[in-house]
Amino acid sequence: MKRTPDSPRGDSSGSKAPRKKSPGNDAARKDTAKKDASRKDASKKESARRGAPRKISPRRTRGASSEGITGKLSLTARGFGFVQTPTGPDILVPYDHLSVAASGDIVRVELLPGTASDKPAGRIVEVLERNQEPLTGRIRRRGKEVRLYPEGQRISRALVLEPASLAQFEDRLPGGPLQEGDILRVRLTLWTDPGKHPQGEPLELVGRRDDSGIELRLIALSRGLPLNFPDELLQEAEAIRMPTPRKALREKTRQDLRNLTCFTIDPVTARDFDDALSIEQRPDGLFELGVHIADVSHFVEEGSALDKEARERATSVYLVNEVLPMLPEHLSNDLCSLVPGRPRLAFSVIAVLDSIGTVHDLTITESVIQSSRRFTYEEVEEILQGESDPLAPSLHILELLAQMLRRQRRDRGSVDMDLPAATITLDEEGVPLSILPVERLHAHRLVEECMLLANRLVAEFVLKEAARHRRPFLYRVHPQPKESDVEQLLELLEQLGIRYHLGETVQPEDYRNILALIENLEFKDLVEKLALKSLPKAVYSTDNAGHFGLGFEAYTHFTSPIRRYPDLVVHRMLKRYIAPGRIALRRGVQDLLDQVASHASEKERNATEAERDYTRLKSLQYLGTKTGKVYSGVISGVTSFGLFVQLNRYLVEGLVHISTLGKERFELNTQGYRLEGSDSGTVYTLGDRVRVTIKGVNPQERKADMELFRE
């Protein structure tokens, strides 16, 4: 599927997932609230008894100095970690240098000798502040020990549960003692020796291993994702009412645009419609393109309980067919949803363009609109392919403008990657039924280009305002890739027989040129994936640094305030800047925006990891039904212990262990891109196409074992 490094709607297809009710029910919420209150009281008493958290200094290595860099540790799925520092690049910490630190800990790290300045590496010498969030995972018994194997990447070791606290916990447990595979929340109590397992105290039984929906709860809780809204918050949301158009239009800044022919384009399963489009051709031949976004900021008052909850969540999280929404459904699926036939409050960006996509004029205004039609992507695609419809002329004009806008982006060097994607279908019990490729439609591209345009125009408008007045704002920035990451990508390309020479600095055009070189090659998908990995992640920032991947001078997120908190903040700031006269900004706005930028970027990363983890879990559960079958794939990773192979059909990755390759000795070459046989000269290279047999799958450990198929 076509994908830019920063999708405007926040998912790979530019579409929205269906919203379902969050897992859990009212009774469960009340029980959980009572348990949380009792746990907090117990935790306070325990903290008072044990005293304040102590700094933990692991055993020092010879030559370690007392100086170091302070930062927050974040572990990865492959076992190593990064320390995020207030200034400077993240510091890589190899697995054997993590000591007794866990994800979220504030640590002091010492740089390793000879480390590169743009990609520093170090070792942790002290844990300054322990992350107090409970760990969630599955129970395993090892002899007399009961261990918790945490979900996610919070900690590198299993926790041994303290026998005394475990006995007390099990005595109070309904349904009898803990069973293998049950899910617990545990507090880390002691870990001072990296050679030993940390100790933990059980806090809560999340569920039994066979409970319905337990996997989603496990992944959500392990990532700190809330499953439900507090009852009082739901009541606050239900009390909000839709104003009549007459009342809404009393606001001098809001225009009545109900005369425009607006329509929404969404997935067939969508229940919230947060953006609508309109297009009209003027007598002078120019086009008025309207991008109308739900005016969430009208309903979510700044500083309210709803606002605080949305700010903390920062984003909706899409777990295959379930959604953990940022806002309660009364807002997301009703008041803020641009349903057809009903007047709705919106924030409209109306751009006047010519036939080649050049913007001649711009209007940004609060509005009242009324959608006339709800389209699905598939319906629009059929119309674009020639099916008759009253709105066909409008859709064909939009398609033409979208093509021109896309061409303009490409001319600026925008990086579009044709990455394959798949969709997983689950039954009511969460059992995967199928994994099918996602088809990228012209209708997807049409909507995507309109959203990209609106986001860019809003950012450029504020940037011009900032040149005349002090205008703090929230931008979406995508930094230039590190030189070392680009060099590594070029080395890989050279191993695959492709040579490309950079100028003095890497430009977006370089990535576009590389993608053009591999367009028709068999390892195209792999190289695009690696090229995407070489790019830094886009983040939120109050400092406009431009968007490397899109090739834009300025960019923001404006088009999805129902499911992204930064968009909601952008709406609020924009309302102040387009209001008549000068609107005084209250003190602390800059600091507030900086906090939102940092928090939202972190929450976005966390949500992405949860979505990937749940998708991999369900993919492996499905693959487990295919044991013994043979599939085609591509070597997606080469290590000293074997080959990682991604299946073409299901886009699932598994390991071909080196012990299954044959009796001869295989060694990893110095570049790390291939395994070489010592006797036969057999070589397995990154990007090679292979056929593999599925030998075994362990979804809980996220592992799939494969063997090369030899006819």
Image (tube, rainbow, N blue to C red):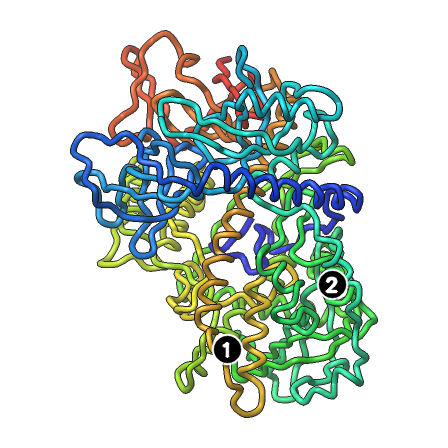
**Position of 575 relative to 305 (above/below):** below
Residue in front for this viewpoint, 24 or 165: 165
- Asked if one can make out residue 446 in the rendered structure from this viewpoint, the answer is no
Residue 443: % across, % down:
65, 59
Q: Is residue 575 left or right of residue 507?
A: right
Identify residue type, mark 2. Leu
Circle 1 crowding by C-alpha within 10 Å: few under 14, some 14–19, many from 20: some
Identify residue type, mark 1. Thr
Residue at point 44%, 72% (across, down) = 590
Residue picked out by circle 1 = 358
Residue at mark 1 to residue at mark 2: CA–CA distance: 36 Å
Secondary structure beneath disc 1? loop
Residue picked out by circle 2 = 331
- Asked if one can make out residue 73 in the rendered structure from this viewpoint, the answer is yes
Residue in front for this viewpoint, 302 or 544: 302
Which residue ends up furthest to the right in the rendered image? 341
Residue 22: % across, % down:
72, 47
Tell whether label 2 touches label 1 (CB within 8 Å).
Answer: no
Total numbered labels: 2
